[in-house]
Amino acid sequence: MAVSGRSRPRGERWEAWRRQARVWRLTARRGLHWVVTKVRGRAVGARRRAELEEAFAIRTAEDVAAELGEMKGAAMKLGQMVGFVADGLPPAAQAAFAQLQQDVPPMAPSLAEQVVVEELGAPPERLFLDWDPVPVAAASIGQVHRAVLPDGRQVAVKVQYPGVDRAIRNDLDHAERLYGLFSAFTLSGIDAHALVDELRARMADELDYRHEAAAQQAFAERYRGHPFVRIPAVVPERSGRRVLTSEWVDGLTFSELLASGSPEEHQHVGEVLFRFAQGSLHEHRTFNGDPHPGNYRFHPDGTVTFLDFGLVKHVTDEEYDRLVPTIDHVLSSDAPGLVAAMERAGFLHPGHGLDPERVFQTVSAPYRAYLPEEYTFTPEYTRDAMTSLLDVRGPNADVLAALDMPPSFVLLDRVVWGLSSMLGRLRARNRWRGILVEYLHGTPPVTRLGRAEASWRRQRSAEGSG
């Protein structure tokens, strides 16, 4: 994997030729299939559908909704939201979270096609030049199919499970059960009610793929032409409330990168992931609240594609202005200033009587990597830092009991820990402090990637004023 470079015009011409060739091949194949079908009769298609139905161990639409409501729906989303804490939990709890995050069995081809018809007004074979009824991925509320548009573009089509919206809304209407489920893990410093309430607010958007499409399109425009960040383009004419079609992206998964990538590639990828998260928050007041390892694809030219924008959070200027001083005081190791900033931000209530130094030692855990000039993330760092916030009977129990996470920062806390976990698995070493301050206060770039991004930013600015 190289760490620089862009697509050249020659490469674009090659891709256009490949796309046109794909159209010719698929058109010919479909024409031949039509002739064969006419000769052999419709029974052939029926048998094939029956084989697919049996292979998937098909459930009815009601079964899908019931299963997701009982085991997967909101409970699974809750497990995904708090999955970042797994490194700090006992093995049994880690196993429970892993079970919550397992892919659900895919739905029948007929059910997926039914959703496409209801949302887009026609069956997949009329909307796409080619449609694979076998999904390439199945997740908490939908599954992804590979397809080809009439113009030859390969696309990923995310189709929502029938009835999952009702199942999850039913879960969320019984929020007390979710409060109890999450509180059972005793995650100090994170308000169970705040997390579940944030989940309730976000799920309404996530169940409507039109919100995700809009968020993905906004990210694609923000990062248009970026030197190392890619966002797949949305295909609006093939998208709806329960169907989202976007550009297909090949590339290594996170696990494949860990297994086959060199240490240099791991360092490069770690910085890209970190810069995307920090740039989105500090420059655009928006971030993707789902830093899941499955939401990335890694390419030979060093670029990274970011997927899945169903859990995007917008931070108001007021919230941001309360947050930044707390980070600044941590970076400067200013314990009294940190406590005062936390009180203003709502993380601590005035009159708590806590020793500022003990508060600093406790709450700086997620930011210890940013105190020295250089730091190497490790899995042990994430585990130890998380464990320190889970030890409700330890020496800092009174500090943990006094912490109050405002709901607006719940998802951001998830991003901090999720990103730390991935950087730890990459054993990424860098000048994280300097990179963070770049985004906080606009200081000069401290790495080659930072300089490339600054150049791109100046070019975008010149285009906007030209």
Image (spheres, rainbow, N blue to C red):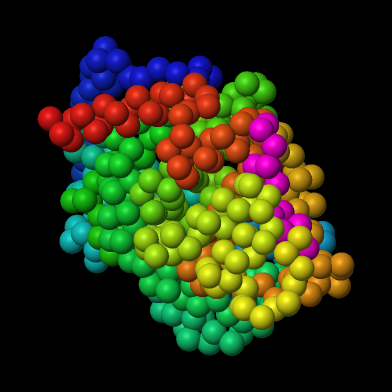
**How far from the left and from the top, in percent, is residue 152?**
23, 32
Span shown in magenta: 358-374
**How far from the left and from the top, in percent, is residue 442?**
43, 38
What predominant SS class does the magenta segment belong to? helix
| Nearer-the-camera pick, 64 or 361 | 361
Residue shown at 50% from the left, 77% from the top: 197
| Nearer-the-camera pick, 444 or 40 | 444
**How far from the left and from the top, in percent, is residue 86?**
71, 58
| Nearer-the-camera pick, 440 or 82 | 440
| Nearer-the-camera pick, 14 or 37 | 14
Query: Which quadrant would residue 201 be assigned to in this image?
Result: bottom left
Q: Is residue 214 visible?
A: yes
Whether residue 314 sits left or right of residue 21 in the image: it is right
Position of 283 relative to 173 (above/below): above
Quarter occupied by the C terminus:
top left
Whether residue 1 sits left or right of residue 402 in the image: it is left
Position of 86 relative to 149 (above/below): below
Residue shown at 51% from the left, 17% from the top: 2
